[in-house]
Image (cartoon, rainbow, N blue to C red):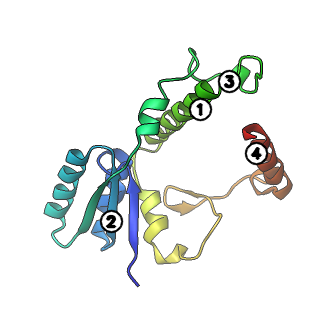
Amino acid sequence: MLIIYITTGGSSGIGHETARVLALRGAHVVMGVRNMAAGKQVQEAIVKEIPTAKVDAMELDLSSMASAHRITYPEGIRFHKINDEKQYSKYQAYGQSKLANILHTNELTRRLKGAATTCYVALHPQVKGVSGAYFSDSNLAKTTELAKDIDLAKRLWDFSMNLIK
């Protein structure tokens, strides 16, 4: 069975490193990139480092993310008015959600600065079939009792769903 791994943001940062490590382990990798020229450069660099690598670059259409995040509320994220129906604008709220996606990705990259755990979970035979577990620094990590609370998880799910209705 052929398994293909798809990474997003493959032309830089954690996406690039994830693609490189997966290719190093013999995986066929398709990198989703916004800039095809940058994606081709990374593809060539990986193949130069790992001549047997199977790496492809694919341009992602992120026009929604690229432009919509510009049409948001003046303060960016309205933490204090997240559910304010009086000043709600569907366009600015959508822009706020796209801005939140970008901010979250950037902050995640700053905090993690690497792909070791991602690659470990994707490739290591010891974690094959493991689902719903929490990993930190390539190790199965213990969570608090609250993190295991099924009722709390359901309440959070319902709360989140109500927020987006």
Label 4 or label 3, whichever comes before in sequence order:
3
Amino acid, disc 3 = Phe
Are discs 1 and 3 less than 8 Å apart at CB?
A: no
Quarter of image, res 159 = top right
Q: Which residue is drawn at 27% across and 43% down?
A: 35
Left or right: where 118 falls relative to 72: left
Determine which residue is flagged by label 3: 79
Are discs 4 and 2 less than 8 Å apart at CB?
A: no
Left or right: where 104 falls relative to 9: right
Q: Nearer the viewer, mark 4 or mark 2?
A: 4
User: Vertical placement of 86 versus 162: above or below?
Assistant: above
Label 4 or label 1, whichever comes before in sequence order:
1
User: Gap between marks 4 and 1, in whole Å?
Assistant: 16 Å
User: Gap between marks 1 and 2, in whole Å?
Assistant: 32 Å
Are discs 4 and 3 less than 8 Å apart at CB?
A: no
- Is 7 or 17 nearer to us in this picture? 7
Determine which residue is flagged by label 2: 29
Determine which residue is flagged by label 4: 161
User: Gap between marks 1 and 3, in whole Å?
Assistant: 14 Å
Determine which residue is flagged by label 1: 94
User: Gap between marks 4 and 3, in whole Å?
Assistant: 17 Å
Q: Nearer the viewer, mark 4 or mark 3?
A: 4
Label 4 or label 2, whichever comes before in sequence order:
2
Are discs 2 and 3 less than 8 Å apart at CB?
A: no
Q: Residues within 10 Å of mark 1 (few under 14, many from 20)?
A: some
Label 1 or label 3, whichever comes before in sequence order:
3
Q: Residues within 10 Å of mark 4 (few under 14, many from 20)?
A: few
Amino acid, disc 4 = Met
Badge 3 marks a residue whose secondary structure is helix
User: Gap between marks 2 and 3, in whole Å?
Assistant: 38 Å
Are discs 4 and 1 less than 8 Å apart at CB?
A: no
- Is 155 or 36 nearer to us in this picture? 36
